[in-house]
C-alpha cells in the first residue's frame, strides 16, 4: 500500500513523525480513516484514540485530546493539545486527573467555573484510563 | 605606605563583585539554554497551526468567525506587554519600554484608547506611570515560571474581550529574536486574525473538505492559534531577556577582570614604593649613626 507522511504535534513536542499507510482518527462527527491520496481535508477531533499503520505494517496507537486533523498534499497532520502513545499513559496520573475533574464538576456553582473545560478534562481522563487499562490487561495475558 | 590599605580594600571589593556577576552569567546561560529549547519545541505546532488557519480562513466566509472580522473603526485597543521580572539585563527593559511608548503615542495620535495587559514586574512598575494607558490585567506570577495553561487562560480572556467588542484590536509588544545574538523589541497584531491576501490562493483552493463546517472549525482553531502565538511570544521574550542578561553579566565580569588587573598593578607598585621608602630610611639612619 502506498505511504504518506503523518505528523502528530502538540504544543510541547512533535509526538510522532513518519511514513504510514493508514490513519484512523476520532473526528468530531465520527471516526474517519485516511489513506494515501486523500482529498485535502480539515476536521476537528474529539478526545479518543488514533490508530496508525506504519509503513512496515506495525500498528501503533495514540491518545489525543481535543485537536484537529488536516490532510494537504500527501501529508496528514494531527494537531492536539494533548497527545501521547498509549503505552506511555500513566494510569495513576490519569486516575488522579479523573478524581480532580469530578470534584471540579461537583463544585460547579463556584465562581469562574468553566463547564466545558471541566467536562473535556473528565472525558480526557476517562479515555486515557480506558485505553491505558486495556493496554495493561493485554500485556498481562 | 599611603594608599596601600585603600587599594587592597578596593581590590577585594572588585573581586567579590566579579564572583557575583560570574555566577549570574552562568545562571542566565543555563536558563537561556532551557528556554531556547522550550521555544524551539513549540515551533512545529505554531507553524502547523498557522498554516492550517491560513488554509481554512481562505475557504471560509469572512463572517464565519468574529475573530476574522476587520472592525470598521478602532476605538479601543488591548496592548499586551511582555517584559521581564528583573533588571540587570542591559538595555532589554528600556528598549521594550521605548517600543511600547512609541506605539502608544502613535495610537494616541490616531485617537485610539489603549488598555494594558502586562506580563512582568518591570513593565508593571514602568507603565503604571505612563499617561493615557489603563491597566487592565497584571500577570500575578513571575513570567519566568509561565506555563501553557496560564497563557491559555489569558488568551481566553483576551478573545472574550475582543468578541464582546470591548476592544477592536489586540497587539503584543515584546522582544523577538532575530538571531542567536541579536534581538529587537517590536509589535505584532494578533487580533483580528490576518487573512491571507487575495490572489495568494493555493491550487488546492477548489476542493477542500471542511468537517463539520468552516465556522465550527474556526471557532475552535482560532483561539488555539492565538494561545500559541502568545505562548511563543512569551517564550521568545524570555529567551531574549536571558540572552541579554548573560551578555550584560559577561561584560560586567570582563570589566571586573580588567579592574582587578589595574588595581593589583597599582597595589604592587604602592607596596614596593613603601618598602623602598622604609629601606632608605633604615640605610639613612645607619649612615647617620656611623657618621
Image (spheres, rainbow, N blue to C red):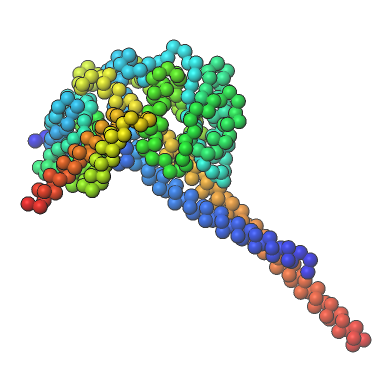
Q: Which quadrant of the figure has residue A64? A: top left
Residue visible at 69% across and 63% down? B9
Horizontal and vertical percent position of residue A77 = 23, 33
Horizontal and vertical percent position of residue B138 = 49, 33
Does residue B268 appear left or right of residue B24 in this picture?
Answer: right
Name the outermost residue toward the top.
Answer: B72
Say which of A65 and A39 sits in front: A65
Compared with B147, B134 (above or below) is above
Name the outermost residue toward the right.
Answer: B291
Residue visible at 55% across and 38% down? B122
Tell me, yes or no, if residue A90 can be seen here: no
Compared with B193, B278 (above or below) is below
Horizontal and vertical percent position of residue B70 = 40, 15
Residue visible at 84% across and 77% down? B281
Residue visible at 17% across and 45% down? A132
Say which of B128 and A44 sits in front: B128
Horizontal and vertical percent position of residue B276 = 78, 74
The N terminus of chain B lies in which quarter of the figure? bottom right
Q: Which quadrant of the figure has residue B12? A: bottom right
The C terminus of chain B lies in which quarter of the figure? bottom right
Amino acid at each position: 500500500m502506498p505511504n504518506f507522511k503523518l505528523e502528530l504535534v502538540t504544543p510541547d513536542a512533535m509526538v510522532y513523525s513518519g511514513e504510514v499507510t493508514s490513519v484512523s482518527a476520532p473526528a468530531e462527527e465520527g471516526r474517519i480513516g485516511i489513506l494515501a491520496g486523500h482529498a485535502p481535508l480539515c476536521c476537528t477531533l474529539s478526545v479518543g484514540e488514533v490508530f496508525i499503520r506504519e509503513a512496515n505494517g506495525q500498528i501503533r496507537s495514540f491518545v489525543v485530546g481535543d485537536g484537529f486533523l488536516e490532510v494537504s498534499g500527501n501529508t496528514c497532520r494531527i494537531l492536539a493539545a494533548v497527545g501521547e502513545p498509549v503505552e506511555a499513559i500513566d494510569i495513576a496520573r490519569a486516575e488522579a486527573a479523573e478524581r480532580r475533574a469530578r470534584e471540579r464538576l461537583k463544585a460547579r456553582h463556584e465562581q469562574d467555573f468553566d463547564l466545558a473545560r471541566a467536562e473535556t478534562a473528565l472525558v480526557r481522563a476517562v479515555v486515557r484510563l480506558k485505553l491505558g487499562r486495556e493496554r495493561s490487561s493485554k500485556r498481562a495475558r | 605606605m599611603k594608599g596601600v590599605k585603600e587599594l587592597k580594600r578596593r581590590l577585594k571589593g572588585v573581586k567579590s563583585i566579579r564572583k557575583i556577576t560570574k555566577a549570574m552569567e552562568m545562571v542566565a546561560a543555563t536558563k537561556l539554554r532551557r528556554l531556547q529549547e522550550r521555544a524551539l519545541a513549540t515551533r512545529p505546532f505554531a507553524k502547523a497551526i498557522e498554516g492550517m488557519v491560513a488554509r481554512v480562513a481562505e475557504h471560509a466566509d469572512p463572517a464565519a468567525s468574529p475573530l476574522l472580522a476587520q472592525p470598521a473603526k478602532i476605538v479601543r485597543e488591548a496592548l499586551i506587554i511582555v517584559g521581564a521580572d528583573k533588571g540587570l539585563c542591559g538595555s532589554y527593559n528600556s528598549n521594550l519600554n521605548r517600543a511600547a511608548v512609541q506605539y502608544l503615542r502613535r495610537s494616541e495620535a490616531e485617537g485610539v484608547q489603549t488598555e494594558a495587559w502586562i506580563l512582568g514586574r518591570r513593565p508593571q512598575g514602568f507603565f503604571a506611570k505612563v499617561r493615557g494607558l489603563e491597566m487592565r490585567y497584571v500577570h500575578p506570577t513571575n513570567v519566568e515560571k509561565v506555563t501553557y495553561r496560564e497563557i491559555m487562560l489569558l488568551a481566553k480572556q483576551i478573545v472574550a474581550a475582543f468578541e464582546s467588542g470591548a476592544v477592536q484590536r489586540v497587539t503584543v509588544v515584546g522582544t523577538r529574536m532575530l538571531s542567536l545574538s541579536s534581538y529587537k523589541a517590536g509589535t505584532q497584531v494578533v487580533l483580528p486574525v490576518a487573512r491571507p491576501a487575495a490572489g495568494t490562493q493555493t491550487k488546492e483552493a477548489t476542493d477542500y473538505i471542511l468537517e463539520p463546517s468552516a465556522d465550527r472549525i474556526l471557532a475552535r482553531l482560532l483561539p488555539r492559534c492565538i494561545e500559541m502565538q502568545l505562548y511563543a511570544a512569551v517564550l521568545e521574550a524570555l529567551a531574549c531577556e536571558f540572552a541579554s542578561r548573560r551578555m550584560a553579566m559577561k561584560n560586567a565580569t570582563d570589566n571586573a577582570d580588567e579592574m582587578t588587573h589595574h588595581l593589583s598593578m597599582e597595589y604592587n607598585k604602592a607596596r614596593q614604593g613603601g618598602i623602598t621608602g622604609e629601606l632608605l630610611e633604615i640605610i639613612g639612619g645607619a649612615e647617620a649613626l656611623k657618621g
